[in-house]
Amino acid sequence: MKLSIQTLEIPFKHSFSHASATRQETEAVLVKAITASGATGYGEGCPRSYVTGESLSSAVLFFDSFKDELIGLDDLPSMLDWAGRHANDIDQNPSAWCAVECAILDALSRERGCSIEVFLSLKELEDVFSYTAVLGSEGIKTFDGIMAMYQQVGFTDYKLKISGNLELDQQKIALLKSHPDYRVRLDGNNLWQSADEASTYIEALDCEFVGIEEPLNIQDFASMRRLSVAIDSKIILDESFLTVDDFSQITSDPLHWIINLRVSKMGGIIRSLETAKQARERNVGLIIGAQVGESSILTRAALTVASQHKSDLIAQEGAFGTHLLERDVVSQPIGFGLNGQLDASKYAKLAGFGLEYNL
């Protein structure tokens, strides 16, 4: 197996902000895999320092450190064996491994002439998936324009990133309420320091919502439990849930929690499938998420997981494609259409991810 890595930087059509960061372009690594027969696949990872502690340079370092071993992963058993023996290394570098794993799976399944789903003994993609409209922490004028665009498309499911400016956030909630058909969840991006501070702010918003994501300090599970009770709503875990070991913190009271499962953050498709499986078994809620700025590669990888657990999903994020990116890495970008929907069945029975790359 020949492997190579590069960084991927694609400008956004507009900047995107939340309490932890403002982004104007992608921040990703791209791995290319070529089998002995010449089948070529690609994988993507989005390292985020505030999520997994990774960076572009650390992802490249992981790849370079293990490249001599990774080139020997020329079938599924050898890849699973290597991942099992290097679980701790992957825990520290999940986005880097995600890019490697996706590239190898794409190449091997293309070589076999089947989809990644068939290669992994999963059911083929089918059905239509509905995506969430994500609203950043921008000013009210920009927010109003983005809301109008989403309304025109036909979105009804929203994720609102809390800015920390109560008056501004109240204005945004009022705009949401002016539309008769909507469902919203909040995203705190670790904004508040205590459950009391968070509950006071959230109650002042005067808004019904499905759950709130990462309201407090990362992995402060005790305080998040108290907040869940105080506001009578579930807590969505993103930065606070990185590996299946984190289930030990939440399975004693599963009804308080929802997991935001991002394929890059979890360390690839196979780890994500195991996490989703355990969430179902433990009665923990599940959202299939996405990193801001993902290309069509990670959007497609997330569909592999979502399609196996569609009945479990509370919501699904991503599929922004060239709605956000100036360009994509494929000739036909994957993106949501009318009503925020995407028909996944068009990628069924195609080799690998079923994407045509323009790299």
Image (cartoon, rainbow, N blue to C red):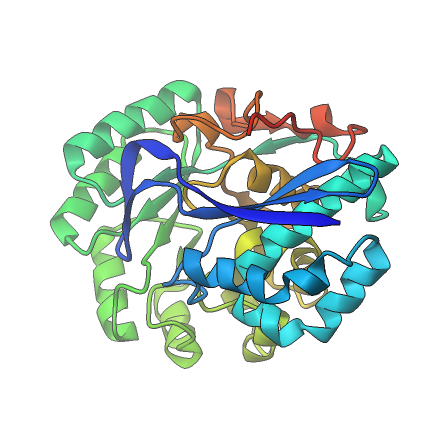
Identity of the residue drawn at 66% across and 73% down: 87
Identity of the residue drawn at 57% across and 42% down: 298
Residue 34 drawn at (x, y percent): 72, 41
* Relative depth, front residue between 319 and 99: 99
Residue 228 drawn at (x, y percent): 41, 68
Residue 264 drawn at (x, y percent): 55, 53
Res 83 quadrant in image: bottom right
* Relative depth, front residue between 308 and 94: 94
Residue 104 drawn at (x, y percent): 72, 48
* Relative depth, front residue between 157 and 325: 325
- Tell me if residue 274 can be seen: no
In the image: residue 249, left or right of residue 268 = left
In the image, is residue 113 above or below residue 99? above
Identity of the residue drawn at 70% across and 60% down: 70
In the image: residue 32, left or right of residue 308 = left
Res 30 quadrant in image: top right
